[in-house]
Image (cartoon, rainbow, N blue to C red):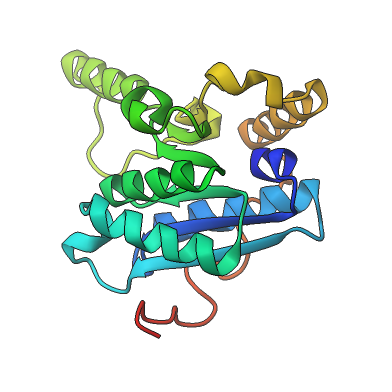
Amino acid sequence: MVAASVSKTGIIGAIGGTSLCGPCIRYIQGFALGAQSINPSIKVFTAYVTNDFSNKAFNDPVTGTNFGQQFIGQNKPDVLFQVAGKTGNGILDAACSAGIYGIGVDVDQFLSYPNADKCIVTSAEKHLTATVEATIKAIAAGTAVAGDNLWNAANDGIGISDFHDKTSLISSDLQSKLAAALAAMKAGTPLKTCPTPCGSLATPAPSPSS
């Protein structure tokens, strides 16, 4: 939603670390659906740095910068979302160098990666501090349960980071829409956040060399 609202060209993009990462794909699918809810005709270009779990997927900022530069040159987005860890830091660097907006991932990257502060609008955030704190307290209290522990909007496990010095880009109408979307996710009311197939690509991702 944010990307579509701040885009002036109607062209945005998202880059994931690897096409084998289901959560990365879900991030990007949700990004596209949110953008389309604001602008149904928006163009959303997506790509993945690699089709494996090599170092390039999440731990190679230099590759991220090069891949980001190539992606920007080919697709001409004016907002770019990264879902690629440290490789994504390089993607944000490419966005800043190109003079376009960037959106971070997992944590508030305006704080965690200040090198890209000049172009970061916000980040799709996992509330890691809260989830780790809650888990430690449960272990200490003897109430922790083995197995997967799902953190989502319903238990404040996810959210959107502060806009910091980009607050002027965020209209009151957009703020209302963001709040309504988060409230709907918390309440479990119908809100399409993932298409079918969710978390997987409908067609195999092309290799980076193709």
Query: Looking at the image, which is closer to me, 173 or 134?
Result: 173
Which quadrant: the N terminus?
Answer: top right
11 vs 201, left or right, is right
In this rendering, does residue 108 appear at all? no
Q: Position of residue 169 (x, y in %)?
A: 69, 26
Q: Residue furthest bottom?
A: 210
Question: Does 150 sit above or below residue 192?
Answer: above
118 vs 197, left or right, is left
Q: Position of residue 45 (x, y in %)?
A: 59, 65
Toward which corner of the image does residue 127 lie, by quadrant?
Answer: top left
Which quadrant: the C terminus?
Answer: bottom left
Residue at image position (32%, 56%) is: 64
Toward which corner of the image does residue 74 lie, by quadrant?
Answer: bottom right
Residue at image position (70%, 45%) is: 7
Q: How many badges with numbers are in the image?
A: 0
Q: Position of residue 192 (x, y in %)?
A: 69, 52
In this rendering, does residue 116 appear at all? yes
Residue at image position (41%, 55%) is: 23
Query: Looking at the image, which is closer to me, 177 or 166?
Result: 166
Residue at image position (54%, 42%) is: 99
Query: Looking at the image, which is closer to me, 191 or 210?
Result: 210
Q: Position of residue 77 (x, y in %)?
A: 61, 56
Question: Does 132 sit above or below residue 90?
Answer: above
Query: Looking at the image, which is closer to me, 148 or 58?
Result: 58
